Amino acid sequence: MSDDDIITAWTERLRMQAPGLSPERARLFVRDLFYAAQRELDKEQAEADFDREE
């Protein structure tokens, strides 16, 4: 599943819970949240890799 597929699926879920939210705002929110979470996971993985190498 691509990033875009994940973002689309979660945008649809968000819009079901918040029907007054515009599609554009919902997608931007989900996209920003997705990439922030991905950056955090990447950071944690890099730290774990660094700790293992020491």
Image: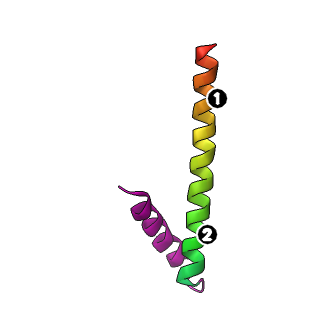
Residue visible at 60% across and 83% down in the picture: 21
- Give the class, few, some or many, for how many residues have Cα within 10 Å of label 2's Cα (few <14, many ≥20): some
Horizontal placement of 18 versus 8: left or right?
Answer: right
Q: Secondary structure at mark 2?
A: helix
Q: Residue furthest left?
A: 1
Nearest to the observer: residue 45 or residue 11: 45
Return the x and y of residue 13 as percentages of the image width and height: 48, 70
Residue visible at 60% across and 26% down in the picture: 48
Horizontal placement of 40 versus 27: left or right?
Answer: right
Q: Quadrant of the C terminus?
A: top right
Amino acid on which disc 1 is placed: Glu
Query: What are the residue bounds of the magenta stretch?
Result: 1-21
Snapshot quadrant of residue 8: bottom left
Residue visible at 35% across and 55% down in the picture: 1
The mark found on residue 47 in the picture is 1
The mark found on residue 18 in the picture is none
| C-alpha gap between disc 2 and disc 1 | 27 Å
Asked if residue 41 is positioned above or below residue 2 in the image, the reply reads above
- Give the class, few, some or many, for how many residues have Cα within 10 Å of label 1's Cα (few <14, many ≥20): few
* Residue 5 in view: yes
Residue visible at 62% across and 22% down in the picture: 50
Residue 18 magenta-drawn? yes
Please give the residue where the numbered disc 2 appears in the rendered image. Answer: 29
Magenta span: chief secondary structure: helix
Return the x and y of residue 30 as percentages of the image width and height: 56, 66
Q: Nearer the viewer, mark 2 or mark 1?
A: 1
Return the disc, 2 or 1, that comes first in the chain's sequence.
2
